[in-house]
Image (cartoon, grey):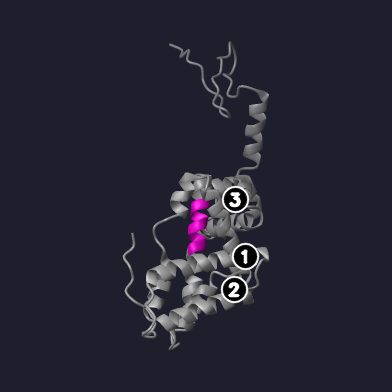
Amino acid sequence: MRDETPSVCRECRARLTPAGKGRPPVYCSRGCQARAYRRRKNPPRPAPRTAPSAPPSGRRRQIAEAVWRIAADRGLDAASMREIASEAGVSLRVVQYHFESKHQLLVTALRMLHERSERQARARIEALRDASDPRVVLRALLDEFLPLDEERRVALRVHAAYYARSLTDPALAEIFLHDAQPMEDLVTALITQLPTGARDLAPVDPRREADLLVSGVTGLGIDVLHGRRSVAEVRRTLDYHLERLGAAGAGTAAPRS
């Protein structure tokens, strides 16, 4: 008994109507037949077995750096997935392959920037590990918040862009305004190492002073970006506060609340 079930097109898998006479059709149209012919004449090349030129981690960093440049120059509102792909020099599909959503991309780019900034700060501080005066190390750490070179200038502008976006983006704010404060912790530890100050001055609270210093130098760094203050002026202000801390000495840090 002949099977009356219609077959399907070999090219597009559409259902075919059985022919009345002659050979049964294998394509639903001449277009499908032509595409199948071209594919047989020019088969796709097999995927290379060697590792790709840019590993996923390197590609993700390339895309994250594109986010930094857009955020620093135009703000995060301009950082659409298509704009990020164009800035990174990759296709939109590559961006979507490595990042499931724009939110994940923005969060990953921010974390990578934090990690880079912290590595650089620790490397510069490590170079001063033999310094006998903790104020020297403290001054070097605070310099990380100032736009002293292009990398720090970009980092400060990117952080400002993320802060502005976090005011209207609760999901991003949860990541940007996290509880961890590694820089404040480092500043607190350095202030704690200050020697005992003069007897007629009350010792400072290391944690409170660290909060003021980090917040203050960040704001002063923004002023430098705007041209409202010079780096020399900001450094004189920092020297004033470090001299005050050195004179008073460190007391017991108040518990964080």
Q: Residue at x 49, y 63 (%)?
A: 114
**Which residue corresponds to mark 2?**
234
User: Where the N terminus falls, by quadrant?
Assistant: top left
Percent coordinates x, y for residue 40 in the rendering: 62, 38
- Is residue 95 visible from the viewing direction of this image? yes
In the image, residue 49 above or below residue 220: above
Percent coordinates x, y for residue 244 in the rendering: 47, 79
CA neighbours of label 1 inside 10 A, class few (<14), some (14 to 19), many (20+): some
Q: Name the amino acid, label 2.
A: Val
Label 1 vs 3, first from the N-terminus: 3
In the image, residue 93 above or below residue 156: above
Distance CA(mark 3)–CA(mark 2): 28 Å
Percent coordinates x, y for residue 156 in the rendering: 58, 63
**Which residue corresponds to mark 1?**
223
The nearer-to-camera label among 3 and 2 is 2
Q: Name the amino acid, label 3.
A: Leu
The nearer-to-camera label among 1 and 3 is 1
Distance CA(mark 2)–CA(mark 1): 9 Å
Label 2 vs 1, first from the N-terminus: 1
What span is colored magenta in the figure? 106-114
Task: Tell whether 199 sits left or right of 45.
Answer: left
Image quadrant of residue 87?
Answer: bottom right
Q: Which mark is residue 76?
A: 3
Question: Secondary structure beneath disc 1?
Answer: helix
CA neighbours of label 2 inside 10 A, class few (<14), some (14 to 19), many (20+): some
Please identify the dominant SS of the magenta region. helix
Percent coordinates x, y for residue 25 in the rendering: 59, 20
Q: Name the amino acid, label 1.
A: Asp
Based on the picture, tell me whether residue 83 belongs to the magenta stretch.
no
